Amino acid sequence: MENKKIAIIGLGYVGLPLACLCARKGYYVLGIDKNPKIVNLVNQGVSHIKDKKLEIELRKQKGKIKATTSFQNLSKVNYIIVCVPTPVNNNHKPDLKPLKSALKGISKFLKKGQLVIIESTIYPGTTEEIVKPILEESGLKVGKDFFLAHCPERIDPGNKRWSLDKIPRVLGAITKEGKKKATKFYKSIINAEILELNSIKAVEAVKITENTFRDVNIAFINELAKSFDKFDIDIIEVIRGASTKPFGFMPFYPGCGVGGHCIPVDPYYLIEKAKGIGFNHKFLKLARMINNSMPAYTVSLLESKIDNLKDKKIGVLGLSYKADVDDTRESPALKIREILEEKKAKVFVFDPFIPEKSSVSSLEELLKKVDYLILATDHREFKDMDLEKLKENKIKIIIDGRNCLNKEKIKSLGIEYKGIGR
Ligand code: SAJ
């Protein structure tokens, strides 16, 4: 039987679900992660990511995924999939340190015949200009001794419908043989279209395009929300209306900001790389500026109603970047908290998915301590909360940063409501 042994470098939001899927499909999985805590948890069949499906799946695959911090057993596998983060630093510059460190680890143990696939999101040119040279430090040559492909990760954390095995993928490789091997691998684990492109740069551009598309459209609707606040138009009504158009319109929703490890990050990879080759992405930069302005805009909606925030007791509902996940990367909620603290407000935060970073242990406890609320994450618990409790706890104003609450009901309770564009 073909050597169905695979190594996955990086056991985070991308690598861990992929490890479970490969194990489920009969692969022996060597999971390599630099964090010993994650390694120990995975070897116990425990997920460090709060995701019901993933937790169950990891328990089921216990024993078929061997996690380690070392690269030394890499020579035993025939596929090596790189799923490490490709973040930006504080100046929004791409940070390829995690990728380079993973590649250096691989290069030490790379063996003839192995296929290396980069799933991390990278800018056009990365595979040929950065990945290939580091791997060839092994003394092996791409195409002759080993194969190198890129298949950008596509995962929507928390999405119940689109599980990893159902999401179509796009891939490319340095050589035709490498592309064929990569396609064969993905067809063995994914029950959806696997599209081969002719150029690996085009594949690197696909992922960036997908996510930049989202970022600019969210910026568009965020700018409309600011404008419609002045017009006193409810933007959710407008989006509902525009969404009846069966073609040519796609709804996006305004909010207190754009978080996560992809959407607010990927555009900077393109902006910076393009700048290096003489193109200035004015529009993409403007979209990033608009989305980055939303946390401050959200706070200003409260400040404009109570003059100043100093010593005011304010509750922030949610810390993660989107509903029902425990991930705070680039989360607008963190920015909102920072701005409130800069304005000397007394801030209490509660996120049911992130108790360790919450200042209280329950929503009830938070409501007892504050007079004003800013909802930053549309967790199910907040969408379903009993609004009468807001009245009982004499909440004066609520800013709905995700436009997810019942505006009319809140107003009928005598509580002032303001959404983003509604
Ligand atoms: N957001 C808005 N308005 C919207 C949509 C999203 O403000 O209309 C905000 C969210 O609140 C969140 C951020 O943008 O803070 C990102 O939202 P997201 O839904 O894109 O969430 P991600 O980053 O976890 O998932 C995305 C994937 N999501 C969808 O396609 C729905 C997809 O863009 C990528 O496959 C994935 O990141 C990735 O890994 O690249």
Image (cartoon, rainbow, N blue to C red):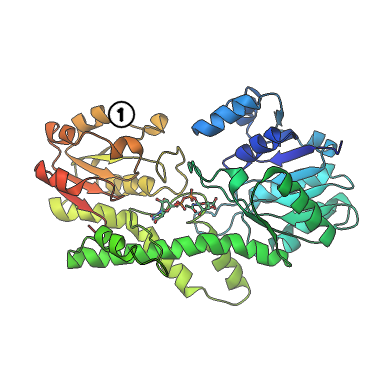
Query: At 80% from the left edge and 52% from the top edge, which residue is drawn?
Result: 181
Locate residue 356: give its quadrant: top left
In the picture, the quarter occupied by the C terminus is: bottom left
Residue 402 sits above or below residue 13 on the image: below
Q: Nearer the viewer, residue 338 or 6?
A: 6
Q: Position of residue 113 (x, y in %)?
A: 88, 48
Locate residue 244: give its quadrant: bottom left
In the picture, the quarter occupied by the N terminus is: top right
Residue 240 visible: yes
Q: Position of residue 238 (x, y in %)?
A: 27, 63
Q: Position of residue 69 (x, y in %)?
A: 70, 33
Query: At 32% from the left edge and 48% from the top edge, which residue is drawn?
Result: 336
Q: Position of residue 195 (x, y in %)?
A: 68, 59
Residue 48 visible: no
Number of marks in the image? 1
Q: Amino acid at mark 1?
A: Val
Q: Mark 1, residues whose alpha carbon is within 10 Å: few (<14), some, or many (≥20)?
A: some
Residue at the outermost bottom position: 278
Residue 132 sits above or below residue 397 on the image: below
Name the residue carrying label 1.
Answer: 360
Q: Nearer the viewer, residue 17 or 302?
A: 17
Q: Could you tell me which secondary element the residue under label 1 belongs to?
A: loop
Query: At 47% from the left edge and 74% from the top edge, which residue is drawn?
Result: 282
